[in-house]
Amino acid sequence: MGENQYKYKLLALDMDGTLLNDNHEITLETINWINKAIQEGIHVCLSTGRAAMHALPYGQQLGLDTPMVTVNGSEVWKSPHELWRRYLLDKELVREMHQIAVETGSWFWAYSTDELFNRDRWPDTLDTQEWLKFGFNTENDEIRHQILLKLQDMGGLEISNSSMTNLEINPAGISKASGIAEVCDLLGITMEQVVAVGDSLNDLAVIQAVGLGVAMGNAQDTVKEAADLVVASNNEDGIVEVIRDYVLV
C-alpha cells in the first residue's frame, strides 16, 4: 500500500463508548466511513481495554488486518493473530488487589493471558495464570475512593477507568499511549501522525500523546478537557465526524 497523502496516517479507536454504540454495535454509517479511510491508506487500529478475544470479532467485521492494542496496552498485536508484545502484572500485586476487592466487597474481574476471571469465578491459585489487567467496579463513590488510595500506596501500577464506576489496573507505564507508540514503531510513523478517539480515563494518555486527540460527546469530562476536539456521541456516529471532517481532508 502506497503512502497516503493525508496528514494523519493512523486512526486509533477505543471500542466501548466510542466505536460501539450503547447496543455494542458498529453502525453501518461508521463501517462505511472506516472502509473509506482504509481505502485511502489510513491504518485503523483498535485500541481497547478488552482482551483480544473480545475485540477480534469487531476487527473481523471491519476487515482489519492492522496492529491492535488490547487490555489497555498490556498486549500489542502486530496483526490480529500475531502477538508483538505482552506486559504482565506482578502476581503479588494481583494477590493484594484481590484481597482489597474481597475486603471492600467490590465486584472485581481480571484478564489473564488465557481467560477472563471475576468474583463469581476465581482461580484456586493465582500462580497458574499470567495476569494482564485487574479491575474493580462499585457504584459506591466512597469505597471506590478508598480502593484508589490503597492502589496508589501500592505503587507499580497504572490506574485508569473505562467507566465512572470502575478502576482498571495495568503494570506501571503501560497504557494505550505506550501501546500506540509501539504500533507507530511497527508502521514507521510518528505519534504526531495519529488520531486517537476515546471516552474514558484509559484513553486519556493516548489522547494527550498523539497529533489529534478526540473525545466522544459521551466522554468523561476529564477526557473532554484534555482532548483537542469533542465530536458527537457513540450513539450519533461520532467516529464518522472524525474521519469525514478531520482525517480524510
Image (cartoon, helix red, strand yellow):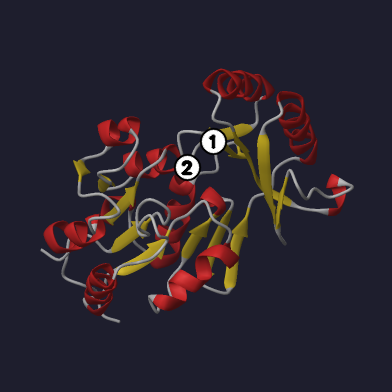
**Which label sits on residue 56?**
none
Left or right of 59 on screen, residue 227: left
The reply to whether discs 2 and 1 touch (Cβ–Cβ < 8 Å) is: yes
Q: Residue, x 19% and y 43% (percent of image)? A: 229
Q: Amino acid at mark 1?
A: Asn
Tell me: residue 72, above or below residue 6.
above
Q: Give the vertical position of 190 relative to 187 (above or below).
A: above
Q: Residues within 10 Å of mark 1 (few under 14, many from 20)?
A: some
77 lies above or below 22: below
Q: Position of residue 93 (x, y in %)?
A: 74, 34
C-alpha span from label 2 to label 1: 7 Å
At horizontal 21% and vertical 43% (from top left) the residue drawn is 230
Image quadrant where one finds the C terminus: bottom left
Residues 134 and 153: in front is: 134
Camera-nearest residue between 158 and 181: 158
- Residue 52 or 163: which is nearer the viewer? 163
Quadrant of the rendered structure where residue 63 is?
bottom left
| Residue 125 showing in the rendered view | yes
Quadrant that contains the N terminus = bottom left
Which residue bears the numbered disc 1?
166
* Residue position for label 2: 162
User: Count the marks: how many?
Assistant: 2
Residue 96 placement (x, y as % from top left): 77, 30
At numbered mark 2, what does the secondary structure look like: helix, strand or loop? loop
What residue do we see at 65% from left, 19% from top?
153
In-image side of 237 versus 81 (left or right): left
